[in-house]
Amino acid sequence: MENKTEIRKMRSWVIASRPRTLPAAIVPVLVGSAAAASDNKFILLYAFIALICSLLIQIGTNFTNDLYDYLKGADDEKRKGPLRVMVHELITVAEMKTGIVIVFLTAFTLGLYLVYTGGFFVLVIGIASILAGIAYTAGPYPLAYNGLGDLFVFMFFGVVGTVGTYYVQAHTLTYLPFLCSIPVGALITNILVVNNYRDIDEDRAANKYTLAVKFGRRFARYQFIFLLFISFIMPLILFFGFDFRGWVFLPYLTFPIAYKLIKMLYLYNGKELNKTLELTARLSAIFGLLFSAGILL
């Protein structure tokens, strides 16, 4: 009986980590490492540690989001999205707070090696990422509740994640990792856009003022399309501006997925949008893999 209880608890922690969102932590490291490799700066050990830290920060952010959306009433048993462990009392508030501390502290400790090799700037990146992960839904001015969630995701899972990965290996900054970070951040942000589009009514009732709540469904659809557009423009910029070979257009193989997503966003409502959310996350991962390959080749 005790073993079954432990297994259920372990499954609850896995659910709380939101495995389907974890490509959002992997793609920036892949693309940043590909950019470093294209400049002959790739260091496998540094890239691996950056990947583990990125995953831990993503998981810690997910834990924090689960906890504080529950405490603020934004999540309840009527939610349209995937199961949340706090709502269903699979993990207690005290356990979740302990989990958050352990995960973020582990990320910080592992990151100290990158600080040792890369200097003070890496420390700033790491601390800012952890604080932003907490501030996303916690604190006196939670970003997700005040229309800043999209900017947070773009900056930290796009720009900071990609550029930071490049920096810990190259120990310098160039335009290349910044430009490569734009489609990474845009497509990961689109995951949040779909999530907020689906939950617009529930978020409004919970005083969670996402951009979708502030500006409406039409704005959210246009935002989604715009972020797709800037993602697909970037290979052109790299090809004509940085002399990359035609392989950099590999992400264009995902055009059919992008088109399907736009149709789904106009046709689907409520829980149907969970399919759109899943496919949006898949697009981010596939685009990131192809983009990384295109940069390397």
Image (cartoon, rainbow, N blue to C red):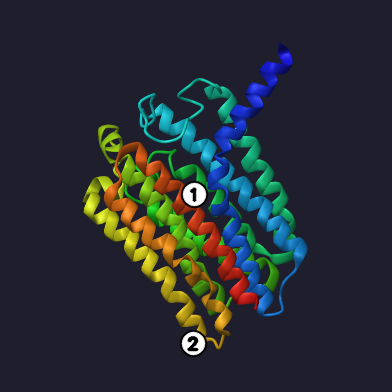
**Which of 202 and 168 lies nearest the eye of the viewer?**
202
Relative height, residue 271 to residue 171 (above, below): above
Q: CA distance from mark 2 to mark 1?
A: 33 Å
Q: Picture quarter containing residue 42?
A: bottom right
Please tell me which residue is depicted at 56% across the width and 47% down the height of the picture. Answer: 58
Report crowding for label 2: few under 14, some 14 to 19, many 20 or more residues within 10 A (C-alpha): few
In which quadrant is the C terminus drawn?
A: bottom right
Mark 2 vs mark 1: give the one in front: 2
The residue indicated by pointer 1 is 132
Q: Is residue 186 above or below residue 108?
A: below
Name the residue furthest right.
Answer: 45
Q: Residue furthest top?
A: 1
Label 1: which secondary element: helix
Q: Position of residue 139 (x, y in %)?
A: 43, 38
Q: Which quadrant is the N terminus positioned in?
A: top right
Q: Secondary structure at mark 2?
A: helix
Q: Which mark is drawn over residue 241? A: 2
- Which x, y percent locates residue 81? 41, 36
* Foreground pick, 177 / 114: 177
Callout 2, which amino acid?
Gly
Marks 2,1: beta carbons within 8 A? no
The x, y position of residue 7, in whole percent, is 68, 23
Left or right: where 127 falls relative to 276 = right
Residue 23 seen: yes
Q: Residues within 10 Å of mark 1 (few under 14, many from 20)?
A: some
